[in-house]
Amino acid sequence: MQIDSDTTDDGLRQAWVQFSAADSYEEYCQYWLELMCTRIGGVSIAALVLESGEAGFQPTAIWPEKSQTDEEFTALIEEGLEEAAGLVHTLASGGYGVAFPIRLDDELVGVVALSLRVNSIVLPAVMEQIQWGSAWIELLLRRHRGREKNLQFDRLSGAVDLLGAVLVESDFNSAAMTFVNELAAALSCDRVSFGLTKGTLVEVTTLSHSAQFGKKMNLIRRLSGVMDEAVQQRGVINYPNTFDSSSLLVEREHAQFSQSYGNANILTIPLHSGTHYFGAVTLERPADNPFSEDEITQIRSVVALSGETLRNKQNQDKTWYQHLISACGQHVKKVLGSGYLGRKLSLILLAAVVVFFSVANGTYRVSGDSLLEGSVRRAIVAPFEGYLESADVKAGERVTQGQEMSSLDDRDLTLEKLSYLSEQAKLQRQYEEAVAKRERAEAAVIQTQLEQNRAQLKLVESKLSRTRLRAPFDGIVISGDLSQRLGGAIEQGEVLFEVAPLDSYRVILWVDEHRMADITEQQQGHLVLNSLPETTSAFKVTQVTPVTEARDGGNYFRVEAVLVDSIPEMRPGMKGVGKIEVDERKLIWIWTYPALQWFKLKLWSWWP
């Protein structure tokens, strides 16, 4: 490896001379890479890859020039960009591959890669040499970016200054005149013209240094054609085009205008907002003052910023009815003209919806929360005071007619019965003895006591028969669970069970008071239970009660209905949603009725 003190080497001296004399971005990078390879020595191929804006990372210099990189060297470059760190690899072709990233303010801007054949002990010195040498590339990039920022600042400054002058004016005509005059003065133009589209053509509205001009002047007509040529082709036309020989833009109007009016350099920039082109600006210069690429870029920035502002000022100067006519015309063009398929489909869909709702009818139904109850609800009560002996059923279980549901403790009644039977036998003997002795008075008394005893016995036997509580009919127990009260005391008349039949039901509906005017008896409806959402059952309204209940922040009336058909899966107490069919009405009325009703009530409450 060569070192900095080796200044006598002719190749190194020549490389320094070329690097110092580089006057372009590409030459600077190429001579820098050649200088680095000469200083390091043993390099077979080297490449400098730098970021190139939207194009990404691109090879900027290759040494030796016009060399072709192989796959292994390309992979080394890609790995250096991906890792963004210094790399040293042993190459399959022999030698070493070195990659070193180039950063600018912690931003990866490139990588330099070398394939060289040297002793491994000098590789640290090679990396150090590349690190020190990369500072020249960083300096170049900083200068390059600095010049670009200055150019951008100059362009932006000029655009903002002109925009400020345009915004100061209160109306469109004054703003347009200021725009063309300031643009002509700043760019040394003989004439600047500004036009806006009207229909399919561009109409010239303002000329620099000309407050008034006739609409039928030949100059205005020719300028309008020049602007139309640029707008219709959707491109900037610079006549004569000395920069891009491959441009396919037609320049016939520009050429004829240049020959007729003497200004050899004509630049026309169309104005657009998105895909809509609304005007153009034409600048004219003499033959000895052509438009440069930088000037064209600057003019496009200025025109794009101020052109939209002028268009807005023109729209602001319109009267309200002009705005209305313009808006209606634009919508009509979008509907009847080409394109805007979405608007056309939306209009067709809207028309179809209007026609549909004009003729479509539907069944008006009033819905409400529903509860299923048995048509009969029989209570099983305690016949007398006593103690609970057994409880064979509980709520939710089916029972058959005569099935024992519960029993009361009958031991006291049994003993009482035995007591009355014993006393009855005793009285019977006394009565027979009195009759045998012909003691009529005593026999009558004993007979009365005997009859009283028999009555008491019948009462006890009746109680004994009622200690067994039985189901009055086939059904289901809807309330009552005595399994936790065995041995406990019960009071006479206490409800122990409630039984409802399984084949006869009624429906309780809670209807919003806003819909009660539509509900009458004998109306039909359908019920869907929460536990049986796939099954619909018919019912008939039997009674509209005046009973109300506050539910979910509203007032609801109780409506009773009888279930026409039932299914085995139904159980009393099931909840669901019932819908009462009222009559046939327009679908649009059915769907908007709640909102209209609410609006009418609010309007009535607000109306003085």
Image (tube, rainbow, N blue to C red):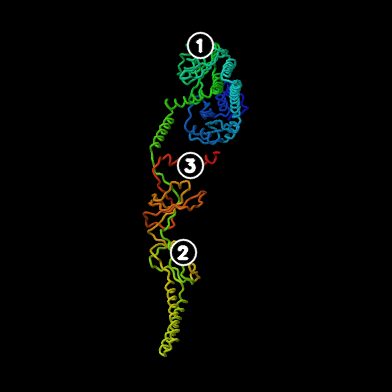
Q: Is residue 26 left or right of residue 347?
A: right
First in sequence: mark 1 vs mark 3 = 1
Q: Which mark is residue 597?
A: 3
Between marks 2 and 1, how big is the CA–CA gap?
Answer: 106 Å
x then y, percent, for residue 110: 55, 30
| Mark 2 or 1, closer to the camera | 2
What kind of residue is marked 1? Leu
* Tag 1 residue: 219
Pick whichever, 317 or 596, lies toward us: 596
Query: Which quarter shows the N terminus?
Result: top right
Report helix, strand or loop for mark 1: helix
x then y, percent, for residue 260: 49, 9
First in sequence: mark 2 vs mark 3 = 2
Quarter assignment of residue 497: bottom left
First in sequence: mark 2 vs mark 1 = 1
Q: Can see residue 250?
A: yes
Q: Are marks 1 and 3 in contact (CB under 8 Å)?
A: no
Q: Is residue 274 above or below residue 288?
A: below
Pick whichever, 140 or 233, lies toward us: 233
Which residue is the extreme one toward the right?
5
* Tag 2 residue: 480
What kind of residue is marked 2? Gly
Between marks 2 and 3, how big is the CA–CA gap?
Answer: 45 Å
What kind of residue is marked 3? Gln
Report helix, strand or loop for mark 3: helix
x then y, percent, for residue 563: 39, 54
